Image (cartoon, helix red, strand yellow):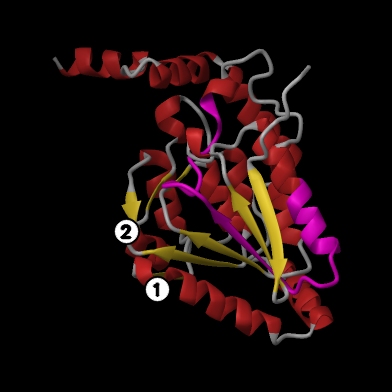
């Protein structure tokens, strides 16, 4: 008898708000095929529910989302989950109901793509962020669609290329986060935004979101998601990606770091 699979995304509806919670704490809410599939289903259900006026995307555990599930990425279907990650970004971006992200812990790589696709992002002041892809031999291709319209161009260039960790204040300054508050005020601030959104007429909110998507400055950038997905898969399955993910798992420097150190010596 096959054991029941434990859900890693939970949803509840109350007061006109659908709260969708990432709960895969063993891998810091990494974007596994299971989490991607369950998250997409939860978002579709929230959009279809007439009782829901706004959606809050939150998490259990210390991390909001650590990005791609690198253990899964080393498997035979590397880079190609059963439900593609772009579908989640598109569901968030095109949802006719406003989406508020509640971020109480670190977000990395693909987790930042989720934030870019949300309408409002509220984080605790101690939260950190990083685009870690290049350090793993990967490219932040798919998430660029939701992030480049949000981020200050110079900041995007710096942080995409360096992979450097940055804090909540910087995240607000560059447009990734709407507001950062002390941890003990996080839930109150999320409730405040949800309450404000609930005052809007559902049809007017949906039309306003569609209007914002027409603005070239807020339109998902850098081309078709299918092309971005193909670029992402090429690097996940390519020589550098395989080496970077293996080095991460083995807690060692990847080969290009060893070469750089040798050149420095």
Where residue 4 sits in the image (x, y, percent)?
73, 29
- For marks 1 and 2, the one nearer the N-term is 2
Residue 26 x/y as whole percent: 49, 33
Q: Which residue is mark 1?
A: 185
Give residue 238's position: percent from left, percent from top.
57, 16
Task: Name above or below for residue 95 compared with residue 241.
Answer: below
Given residues 53 and 223, the one toward you in this image is 53
Q: Is residue 11 above or below residue 206?
A: above
Tell me which segment is drawn in magenta: 41-70
Q: Is residue 101 above or below residue 33?
A: below
Q: Residue at x 62, y 84 (%)?
A: 196
**53 falls in the magenta region:** yes
What secondary structure is found at the residue carrying circle 2?
loop
Q: Nearer the viewer, mark 1 or mark 2?
A: 1
Write down the quadrant of residue 179 in the picture: bottom left
Which image quadrant is residue 254 in?
top left
* Residue 246 numbered tag: none
Location of the N terminus by quadrant is top right
Q: Nearer the viewer, residue 28 or 260?
A: 28
Q: CA distance from mark 1 to mark 2?
A: 12 Å
Residue at (40%, 60%) from the top-left corner? Answer: 171
Residue drawn at x 57%, y 49% is 113
Decide: few, some or many residues near mark 2? Use Cα within 10 Å; few <14, some 14-19, many ≥20.
Answer: some
Q: Using the image as rendered, state which of residue 239 and residue 203 is in the foreground.
A: 203
Tell me, yes or no, whether the highlighted magenta stretch contains residue 64: yes
Q: Residue at x 78, y 47 (%)?
A: 41
Q: Label 2 belongs to which residue?
A: 126
């Amino acid at each position: 008898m096959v054991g029941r699979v434990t859900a890693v995304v939970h949803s509840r509806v109350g007061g006109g708000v659908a709260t969708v919670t990432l709960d895969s704490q063993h891998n810091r809410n990494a974007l596994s095929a299971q989490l991607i599939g369950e998250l997409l289903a939860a978002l579709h259900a929230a959009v279809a529910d007439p009782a829901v006026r706004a959606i809050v995307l939150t998490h259990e555990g210390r991390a909001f989302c650590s990005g791609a599930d690198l253990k899964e990425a080393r498997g035979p279907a590397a880079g190609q989950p059963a439900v593609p990650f772009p579908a989640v970004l598109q569901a968030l971006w095109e949802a006719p109901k406003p989406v508020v992200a509640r971020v109480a812990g670190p977000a990395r790589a693909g987790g930042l793509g989720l934030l870019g696709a949300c309408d409002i992002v509220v984080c605790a002041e101690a939260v950190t962020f990083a685009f870690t892809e290049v350090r793993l031999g990967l490219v932040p291709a798919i998430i660029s669609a939701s992030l480049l319209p949000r981020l200050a161009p110079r900041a995007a260039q710096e942080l995409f290329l360096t992979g450097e960790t940055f804090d909540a204040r910087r995240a607000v300054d560059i447009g990734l986060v709407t507001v950062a508050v002390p941890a003990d005020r996080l839930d109150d601030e999320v409730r405040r935004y949800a309450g404000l959104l609930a005052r809007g007429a559902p049809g007017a909110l949906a039309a306003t979101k569609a209007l914002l998507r027409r603005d070239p400055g807020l339109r998902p950038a850098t081309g078709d998601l299918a092309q971005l997905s193909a670029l992402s898969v090429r690097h996940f399955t390519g020589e550098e990606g395989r080496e970077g993910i293996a080095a991460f798992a083995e807690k060692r420097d990847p080969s290009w770091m060893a070469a750089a150190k040798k050149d420095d010596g």
